[in-house]
Each structure stands twice: as structure tokens, then as C-alpha cells.
Amino acid sequence: MVAELGLFALILALLLAVAQGTLPLIGAARGDVALMAVGRSAAYGQLFFMALAYAALTYAFVTDDFSIAYVANHSNTLLPTQYKVSGVWGGHEGSLLLWVLILSFWSAAVATFSRSLPREVLARVLGVMGLIAIGFIGFTLFTSSPFERLLPAALEGRDLNPMLQDPGLIIHPPMLYMGYVGFSVAFAFAIAALIGGRLDAAWARWSRPWTAVAWAFLTIGIGLGSWWAYYVLGWGGWWFWDPVENASFMPWLMGTALLHSLAVTEKRGGFKNWTVMLAILTFSLVLLAAFLVRSGVLTSVHAFAVDPDRGLYLLAFMAVVVAGSLTLFAWRAGKVGLGGGFSFVSRESALLTNNVLLAVSGAAVLLGTLYPLFLDAFGLGKISVGPPYFEAVFLPLMLPLLLLLCFGPRLRWKQDSPTEQLWRLRWIFAVSLVFGMIWPLFVGSWSFLAGIGAFLGLWIIGSSLKDLVERLLPRAGSRQTLGTRAGRLGRSYVGMQLAHIGVALAVIGITFVLGYDDERDVRMAVGETVEVGGYGFRLDSLERIQGPNFEADQATVAVYRDGQRMTTLRPQMREYFSQDQPMAHTSLHRGFFRDLYVNMGEPLPGNAWVMRVYYKPYMNWVWAGVILMGLGGFLAATDRRYRVRVRREEDLPDEAGNLGGTSGVQPGGAA
Amino acid sequence: MKKRQKRLLLVVGGLAGVAVVAGLVLNAFRDNLVFFYTPSDIVADIVPMERTFRIGGLVEDGSVRRAEDGVTVHFRVTDTAVAVPVVYHGILPNLFREGQGVVAVGSLEDGGVFRANQVMARHDETYMPPEAAEAIKRAQREQARTVSHPEGY
């Protein structure tokens, strides 16, 4: 019964998406206020029915309704309740349902928070989002319904993949999807602007907070995925340049470029075409990611069951979206002015360089990810492109980007003096160079990579803090209190600095862990000690333990440093009752300067196991950096000017020539 | 005039930058492609020495042997026509089994032993690494051809 209810709700959501995707667009073209108003109600209705469908599936999971094929395949009566709830997105169909739910959530959010947008703009944005929703709800209904019945019903479910039974994985997909799908808002704004023929600073200002929020979610989502891989897979790595990771990384790179390009469009009216192009590309890469993961062309931890129909549908959908939006772009974008001029050394040119570097990095990742797939698809051979390629390309591209980050944010718009800026940063430069070069010596033998990483990281943090302090210090003749000055900083500015400091922390962490991690696969018998990264690991005992839905071998490993007992690690090798696959459960000791971790491999004769022992210096700096980046994004999105100015914009008459006309393109430059 | 020169410099600089990056990317790309070979290819001696590549096939039944240290493992990978010896130092994937599909990344040593630095097995109960399946398919096609030839026409 509940399955049919869910299916019915899904069908109603599709119908509402059709209404949302057509009527407001027609209304905006004709200037029909009633039709335009349909957008908002349809968005709310769609969210309601999607939530109903989603609740129905969750209910089926919690009540162990194994007459639904998807539930039978991804749950089990013994599964702890929190994993039943998160098991909803443990497979292709359910995760797609979550994807669509989030899409309708974003639609409704736009409808709620953009009340002050001009009617036509809101109608077009919601219309485009409705069209996207048609694509994805249709995909769910026609190729991947999670409500398919299983007759006769299974007595017991097959259980959720044990790898997914982990708190990190409860939140990774929702965060990631919030990011992926969030970029559909930036895309919808771009398309709406193209349709309306109005690409100006106001458009960038509306689009920017949405982009920042989506970017922040994607950052956190990717970070969580990496964090999960780090301790659940137990391979000691946190980034494998796996095609699925790349699939999420490409939209991130493009989205980062978009975020920076939007700044120029908002503040200086420049780069408009480029910004629109980036919004289209970012969302296209999101669709590509969905295609790569859901079509079965890839095989990885993430790849869902293979079904050629799904791949075909997504490919066709992607083709329609990309071709449609690029055609629209070619038709409409040519008429847009270039915005204010700028000189060689200015914030614009720094942001332009940032964009070029990010776009090139994205293209390099795309090449390495798609080339093997193309060769395979055309039967030209099986090859793979491994981490060495990505590292060889990526690190040299990031170096100038990070150098730019050291002083770029301090540059003035339009024109600045390079010598003056560098002169002001001379002390920070000198101090970070000296400390950066010395710092690695405290971790191990000197490494060039770690030295550069520490130097750049310190320089970025130093110049960010210097900028902050300068703005907080009282100016001559000013009587503002510290509180007032802090209030005047603006969340957008503070968010930017936070995110940049996050980048710096992540760079330090990444270069240190790359340079100094230590991994040892060893035979450990009870009572034996192994030395890794200056720590002693002693296997104290082995025992058999019981979990809710598994049994496990557990090792107790005592960790010593300089003869001092530091902590005890308890890795397990779990056997889940419902699966024939054993699963290693890593035991991790996190610290400010290093992580230690032990993973069980295989039992050996003589009361011994093969164990994998790791020493990972500065790993938490990477996670801290990711969190700061995400927080920075969220903070920037809540800046006051996104709320205040929009309201003022509404008072301006903007009807003239803007209704479907091409003459309404305004010269940019709300400097 | 000065402005035009500046613009020219910008364009030339930009193009040079793009050229450098393109060169960098393509060079790294060429050096780091990892090709796939089957055990039959290795026996036929058509694989490069001193270069990393991937092999795929089934872990031959009864071939897994663990060395004294408990960490080094020897096994043979077969595509059902021929088998090649593989040596690996480290923890094998949880689902590494005799008779199951496996993909290994590494290089060929003197004496025809494949030294793997990464071993991948299926990651759930129904999944066969596509490259393992490919190796077997190729070998069987080859066998079918050599078998049918003497008997046919």
C-alpha cells in the first residue's frame, strides 16, 4: 500500500514539475502575471509530494517491507534503525529519489527566498528548475522506480552493503547532493538571464548566494566522502583520483571558478558571458557526474547496478540540457557588453587568472577521466589513467593558483601597483618563507613539497590575517568602535577569508601527509611490537566479539611513544550475518599533528594477523581546511547586501524592454 | 599604441601559457597511461618491460601461497588459457579468493613474474572486475579460433 502511495506521489510530483516547467515560462514570455505565479505554488506542491514519496520509502525501510524490491535489496530486519533510515539512499533508486527531493527542496527555497526578485525573473528561474525536475523525476519513474514490488515478498532483506553502514556515509550523499543539485539554481539563474536577455550586476548578485551555498555543500560533501574513504576503506588513502571522485571534483573546480567569476560580474559588471558559460558548464559537469555514476560505465565503490536504459536516458538528458543551453548562449550572449576595462595588475586580472587555472585543471581532470572510457566504448583498448597523471598535472597548476591567493584578494579593482602590494607583504613573505622551510624538519627529513606547502600556506594565512587586522584597526581620525568596524567587514568578506585560510590549512595538510606518511603491512603475533612513524604498536590480544548484525575478530593494539602508553586501538574484521563478505573495520586515533591507524588483514597461523599500520601526519588539517572552506561559503551567502539590495532593486522599474526582448540588455558596471 | 602593445603582450602571454599547460598535460598523460594486458599477452611476450600495466583474470585454484613473513603472497592469474605468476607484498582485498576475478597493477620482472603493487578484487558478491572478464573472453575467443581451425574446412 505504502509503495503505491509513494509511486502515486511521485507521479503527482512529475505532473507539478511539468506545470512548473512550462506555465511560468509562457507567462514570462507573454507578461501574464497569473501564469507566472503558478511557478511558486507548483514548486511548493512538488516539494510536498516528493517529501511524501520519500517518507513512504523511508516508512517501508523502517517497517521492513520486503515486498518492495528496493527495500529487500538494501535492508534487513537486523539493521540498526539509523541505517534503515539512511539505507534509503544506499542504492541507485533511493539515492535518486533523495536527489529529486533535494531538487524540489531547492526549487521551493528559491520560491521562498526570492520573493523580492522581479516577477519575470523568478518565473523563469522556477520554470528552468521545473524543466530539470521533469528530467530527473522522469528518470526515476521510467527507469529506476524504488517502489517496484517484489512478488512473492522476500522473507528477509539482503542487507545494506556493510561499507555503507557508517555515520560518515549517513551524511555524505545528502551533503553531496545538496551541492550537486544546488548548482542547478545557479544554472537556472543563468538560463533565466539568457532568456530574459538581461545579464547584469543585479543578476550576478541574485545568483551569487545560491552559488556560494551550493559550493559550500559540495565542498563538505566531497570532504565527507574523502573522510569516509580514509577510514572505512582502510587503504590509507583519502583521495584516489578514482573516476567517481573526479566526477564530483570537476563540478567543484568549475563551481569554484564560477564563484570567483560572479564576484567580477557583480562588482564590476565584467566577465558576463564567461560567468554564464561557467554556470552552464558547472551544471553540465553535475549531469556528467550523474551519468558516470549511474550509467554503469564505471566500476567502483559508487557504481550502481548496470542498466543500459539508465545510461541512455541520462546521456540523452545531458545532451538536451547542454545543447539547449549552449544554443541559447550562442543566440543570446553575443549581445552583452564586456564591462569595465581593467589593467594588467588588478583584482579582475587576478580573478581571470584564477578562472583560467581552475578551468584548465578541470579540463585536465576531464581528459584523464573520460579518455579511458572513450577508448573502451569504441573498442580501442583498455587503459587506465592513474594518480601519477593527475598529480603530475595538478600540482604544477595549483602552484601559481596558490601564489596568486597570497596577494590576489588584496589587489584593488581596476588597477593596482604590484610592487606596492608585494612591498606591504614583505615581512609576511619573509617570515612564512623561513618558517615554511624549517617546519618540515620538525616532521621528518626535509621535503621540497612539504616546504613549498608550508611556505604557501603560511603566506596565505598571514596575508589573510593581515588584511583582517588592517580593517579592524582604527583609521586615523575615525571614532568607530572595534565592534562597529567588525560589523562593517561584511559576512561576504569574512567568508572569503575563512575559505582562503581553509585552503591554506588543506594545502599544508596535503603536502605534509604526502611527504611524510608511513604505511607498513606486517605480520603481528600477540605480544609483538611494530615501529611505525616513531610509534610502537603492540598487539596485546585477539578476541571474538558480537555486534548487532555481525560477529568480528577484534585485535587490541597498544600504542607507545617513547615508552609511554598513548592509546589503545581496537580494529575489527567483521562478518555480517547477511553477507558472505568479511569487512575490515579500521581503528583510528586522531590527533592534531598526526593520525595513527590499524587495520586487520588476514589471520595467519600462530595467533597472528597481517595488519596494516599507518602513521598519517597532519591529516586533520586537511579536514579542518575543508570545514573552513564550507563555513566560509555558507557565511558569504548570508551577507546582508544579498538581502537588502535585492529589495531595493524591486522598486526600480525594470519592465521596459525586458520582457522577452533582446534590447533590454543593460550595460554592465554597477561598480 | 602602448595599449595595443599591452594587449598584444597579453594575448601572446596567454597563448604561451596555454601552450605550456597543454604540453604539460599531454606529456604527463602519455607517460602515465596504464595499459591493460592479459596473461596470454604476457606469455606471448608483447608487454613492455619496466612499465606499469594492469593484468586481469582469475586467481588460479590452489595457487595462493603465503611466504614465511606472512605478508608476501604468491599466486597465479589465469585467463583460462595460460597463467602467470604474481607476487604481492601486503594485505589482499577482503574478497580476494581462489577462482575469483582479480585485477592487478604492477610491472613485469625478469623471469616473467608480475610484481603487483595493487591488487583489486570484486567488491560485492555479484561483481566481476570487467578487466578480468575481458581477459577470459579474449582467451576463450583465441582458443575457439585455434581449436576450430584444424578441425574445420
Image (cartoon, helix red, strand yellow):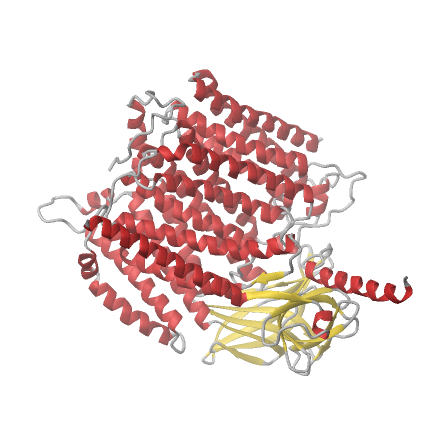
Residue most toward the left? A477
Residue at 48% x, 71% y is: A517
> Toward the viewer: A50 or B102?
B102
Expressed as whole percent of the image width and height from the top left, the position of residue A185 reads 45, 36
Q: Is residue A360 above or below residue A58?
A: below
Q: Is residue A478 above or below residue B35?
A: above
Q: How many marks?
A: 0
Q: Is residue A235 visible?
A: no
Residue at 43% x, 64% y is: A510
Q: Is residue A549 left or right of residue A371?
A: right
Q: Is residue A550 left or right of residue A132?
A: right
Q: Is residue A336 above or below residue A163?
A: above
Q: Which corner quadrant of the image does residue A611 belong to?
A: bottom right
Q: Is residue A394 above or below residue A157?
A: below
Q: Is residue A314 visible?
A: yes
Residue at 32% x, 60% y is: A403
Expressed as whole percent of the image width and height from the top left, the position of residue A62 reads 66, 41
Q: Which corner quadrant of the image does residue A440 belong to?
A: bottom left
Residue most toward the front? B153
Q: Is residue A402 left or right of residue B69?
A: left
Expressed as whole percent of the image width and height from the top left, the position of residue B114 reads 66, 75
Image quadrant holding the C terminus of chain A, namely top left
Q: Which corner quadrant of the image does residue A621 belong to?
A: bottom left
Image quadrant holding the N terminus of chain A, namely top right
Expressed as whole percent of the image width and height from the top left, the position of residue A298 reads 62, 53
> Toward the viewer: B10 or B134?
B10
